Amino acid sequence: MEETKLPAVAGKVSLEPAPDAAPTTEELSVLNATERAAFRLVRAMNRGGWKRFWTFFQRHIGSLWIYLATYNLMNVRGLENIERTDPARPLLLVSNHRSFFDMYTVASVLFRRTRRPIKLYFPVRAKFFYDNPIGWFVNLVMGWWAMYPPFFREQNEAEKRNFDKFSVRELIRLCSSGPGHLIGFHPEGKRNLNDDPYSFLPAQPGIGKVIMASRPQVVPVFIAGLNNDLPKQILGNWAGGEKVRIWFGEPVDLSSFYDKRDSLRTHKEIADHLMERIAGLGEQDRKEFGQAG
C-alpha cells in the first residue's frame, strides 16, 4: 500500500460510523471511464441497504459453497479468539497470503461458526477487478462485491496512485468505527508463491499506517492447505486433498506502538510484529500437521 501523509486519530474508540467521504474530483479524475464506473458501482454496493443485501448472500450462499468445497478437509483452531472480540468495533484480520481464496475461506468459517454480525471488506489490487468487466463479475460471484476499497499502486500510470490516497482514507474509516466491520488484509501485499507454506514475504508498512490511524481490534490468522486451482481444490474435498488449516491467534495488543512517532519506521515495526504473530501460528501448524499438511 502506498504511503500517504495522513494524520493519526486520537486513541479514543468510537462506536459510531465515521463520515463516509467520497474521493476528490482530482483523485477520481486519474481513473479511466471503466475504472470510474467500477469504483462507483462497487462503492454503492458497499453502502447502506445494498451492503446489507449482499451480506445476506455472503452469509447464506457464498459461505455455503465454500463449505461444500472444503468440509472434509477443514481444520480450524483458535475460533474462541474471534469470540473474544467486541462485535461493536471493527475487527481487522491479518493473514499470510498463499491463494486467491484465503480470506473467502476464513469468512465462510466465521459466517457459519460464529453468530457475530459481519460486514466484509477486502482491500484489493485494482488491476483486473476494477479495469475489466470480467473482474467486476468475479468480484460479484466470489465476494458479493466485498473486494473494496481498490488500490491502483501497481498500475503502469504513476498518476493513478493518487487515487490510493482516497483508498487509504476509506480503509482507515472502515477500520475506525462501525459495528460488524470485518476487514481482511494481507501484510505481505501479494501472494507468496514459494512452495514452503511456512515461508513469508516481507511485511509492507501500509497496514501499520492504517492501524496507527484507526486503532481497530487486530487478530492474526495463519492459513495453509489451499491452492489456486479451483477444480483441484473442490475435487480434493472428496479425493483426499491436503488438509485446510486456519489458525486464529489471540487479539494483538499494539498499544506499545501508539506512543511512538507516527512515521514510516513505526508503520513497518507494526507490520513486522504482525507477521511475527502470523509466523508463530505457522509454527503451531507445523508442529501439529507437519510440512506435508
Image (cartoon, helix red, strand yellow):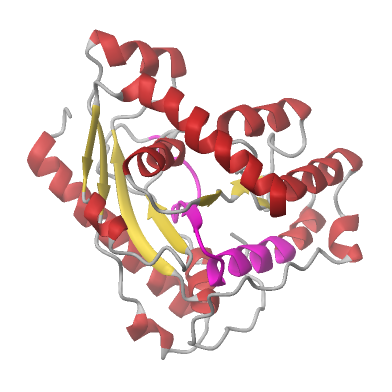
- Quadrant where the image shows the N terminus: bottom right
Residue 30 at x, y percent in the picture: 87, 54
Question: Is residue 242 something that shows in the picture?
Answer: yes
Q: Is residue 190 magenta?
A: yes
Is 69 situated above or below 167?
above
In this picture, residue 76 sits left or right of residue 142: left
The foreground one among 116 and 13 is: 116
Going 62% across and 69% down the picture, which residue do you hit? 173
* Residue at 25% in and 50% down: 79
In the rendering, at what x and y percent does residue 191 appear? Answer: 46, 40
Q: Residue at x 16, y 43 (%)?
A: 285
- Seen in the picture, residue 15 relative to 104 is either above or below; the reply is below
The front one of 156 and 275 is 275
Residue 198, quarter of the rendered image: top left
Q: Quadrant of residue 269?
A: bottom left
Left or right: 109 in relation to 123: left
Please state the extent of the stretch shown in magenta in the rendering: 165-193
Magenta span has 288? no
Residue 36 percent coordinates (x, y): 85, 46
Q: Is residue 208 left or right of residue 141?
A: left
Q: Residue at x 71, y 60 (%)?
A: 164
Res 47 seen here:
no
